[in-house]
Image: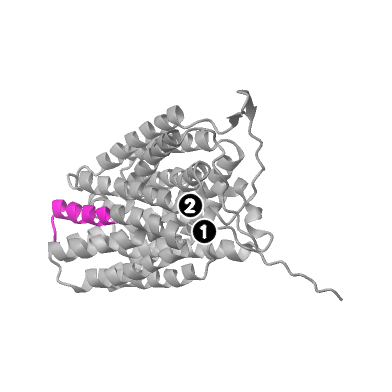
């Protein structure tokens, strides 16, 4: 099976203009992260406000992830078939409106509905964003740019933690309202800055409609691709489960086990996300230098950081240090967007990148499982399981093919001797 490394940038524009476009779509990604991670950051406050158990608050992730999985499948194909720019803008508006829907949340049932609807739009972000920037830049810088994408994600997460330290069970709704307004503003910026990818300006100045091959989900399973597609989905699923098992309970762990006040919890979580922001760029550059598979080592180090976080003295300095290390390591997967897209034909960019969200199949029931384990066996147990899952994911990642080719491969030609 051959792998389809993205070609040179198809949009005729200057390098500076490309980075401006990239910056615009990063605004969407930042508020995508902000809204998505309210699910785990607000757990202790929602539980107190709505009178919920650990298993019930874990169900918020399940419904959000279910919506995201459906949205990833539907919206990525819409983007590939119609307009990636317009689809991304609509997704951003949808996230914003769904986040503002928290105004109507006053019970467990309404919270589940709000999470599902917001999850649907959140699920379309990753594949659509990847399909836009992969079409703007050459493959040799995609790892670095994927690191910037991860930086934007963790920037949004850090922003959430910093704002969130001022809120508690009495006013947690306002956090989602901030994220919703931000997402709507980001969608407006996309419309104003990102060019319409349905047309192209030719050398003579005329405007022509871009011909698109019609993507179909079945293309990910033909020509021997089905084994690769399912391995990628499983890898993503292990990552989501590991993240839920540790990060999903981090704020609860700091409050319930160590008794830290809201302000200190917010600061410690901010340090963790700053670690991810630093690691994002370095892991991205590593992927461009050493290849996409080399970043699997990050998951191994993440597992070790979790052990340190749970076993070393639980002082603020030690928790901040080990949390920073954990955050730094887990973002090694940030290059998965271009990595997944590089393995499939160009017209499947958004659809292929969205495989990452298929991994939520694993985490749908996995989140409920983490809640059940946390409730019956304690937070230490489920967080250790998160570390073991990262280690398992690293092994699976290493079995995948390498796609980065800095130099053209030399193909030997057999020469038949005379006679």
- What residue did someone put label 1 on? 404
Q: Quadrant of residue 205?
A: top right
Name the spot of residue 53 as percent of width and height, x first: 29, 60
Note whether 265 is above or below 76 in the view shown. below
Looking at the magenta stretch, what is its main secondary structure? helix
In front of the other: 357 or 372: 357
Q: Residue at x 15, y 68 (%)?
A: 314
Do the numbered discs 2 and 1 sit on residues whose CB atoms are within 8 Å? yes
Name the spot of residue 18 as percent of width and height, x first: 45, 36
**Residue 54, visible in the rendered structure:** no
Note whether 31 is above or below 355 in the view shown. above
- What residue did someone put label 2 on? 140
Check the image and name the residue furthest to the right.
419
Q: Which residues are magenta?
A: 259-275
In front of the other: 25 or 168: 25
Identify the secondary structure beneath mark 2: helix
User: Is residue 338 a member of the stretch shown in magenta?
Assistant: no
Looking at the rendered image, the quarter that the N terminus falls into is bottom right
Note whether 59 is above or below 201 in the view shown. below
Q: Is residue 197 left or right of residue 325?
A: right
User: Is residue 263 a member of the stretch shown in magenta?
Assistant: yes
Label 2, label 1: how many angstroms apart (C-alpha)? 8 Å
Name the spot of residue 42 as percent of width and height, x first: 27, 51
Task: Give the mark, 2 or 1, whose residue is nearer the N terminus.
Answer: 2
Note whether 249 is above or below 187 in the view shown. below
Identify the secondary structure beneath mark 1: loop
Q: Is residue 194 left or right of residue 377?
A: right
Name the spot of residue 118 as percent of width and height, x first: 41, 43
């Amino acid at each position: 099976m051959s792998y389809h490394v993205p070609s040179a940038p198809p949009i005729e524009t200057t390098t500076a203009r490309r980075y401006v476009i990239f910056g615009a779509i990063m605004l969407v990604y930042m508020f995508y992260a902000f809204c998505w991670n309210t699910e785990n950051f607000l757990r202790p406050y929602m539980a107190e406000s709505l009178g919920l158990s650990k298993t019930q608050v874990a169900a918020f992730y399940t419904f959000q992830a279910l919506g995201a999985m459906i949205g990833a499948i539907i919206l990525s194909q819409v983007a590939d078939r119609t307009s990636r720019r317009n689809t991304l803008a609509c997704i951003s508006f949808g996230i914003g409106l769904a986040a503002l829907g928290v105004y109507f949340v006053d019970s467990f049932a309404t919270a589940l509905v709000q999470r599902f609807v917001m999850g649907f739009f959140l699920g379309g972000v990753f594949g659509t964003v990847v399909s836009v920037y992969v079409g703007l830049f050459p493959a040799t810088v995609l790892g670095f740019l994927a690191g910037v994408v991860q930086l934007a994600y963790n920037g949004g997460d850090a922003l959430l933690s910093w704002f969130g330290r001022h809120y508690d069970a009495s006013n947690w709704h306002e956090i989602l309202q901030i994220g919703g307004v931000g997402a709507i503003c980001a969608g407006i910026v996309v419309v104003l800055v990102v060019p319409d990818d349905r047309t192209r300006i030719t050398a003579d100045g005329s405007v022509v409609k871009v011909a698109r091959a019609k993507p179909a989900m079945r293309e990910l399973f033909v020509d021997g691709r089905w084994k690769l597609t399912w391995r990628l989905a499983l890898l993503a699923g292990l990552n989501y489960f590991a993240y839920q098992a540790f990060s999903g309970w981090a704020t609860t762990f700091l409050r319930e086990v160590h008794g830290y006040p809201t302000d200190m919890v917010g600061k410690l979580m901010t340090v963790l996300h700053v670690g991810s922001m630093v690691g994002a760029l370095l892991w991205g550059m590593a992927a461009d230098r050493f290849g996409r598979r080399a970043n699997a080592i990050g998951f191994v180090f993440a597992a070790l950081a979790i052990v340190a976080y749970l076993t070393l003295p639980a002082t603020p300095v030690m928790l901040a240090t080990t949390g920073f290390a954990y955050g730094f390591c887990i973002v090694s997967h940030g290059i998965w967007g271009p990595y997944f897209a590089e393995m499939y034909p160009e017209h499947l960019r958004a659809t292929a990148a969205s495989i990452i969200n298929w991994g939520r199949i694993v985490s749908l029931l996995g989140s409920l499982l983490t809640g059940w384990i946390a409730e019956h066996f304690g937070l230490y147990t489920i967080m250790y399981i998160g570390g073991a899952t990262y280690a398992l994911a690293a092994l699976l990642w290493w079995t995948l093919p390498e796609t980065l080719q800095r130099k053209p491969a030399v193909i030997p030609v057999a020469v038949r001797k005379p006679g």
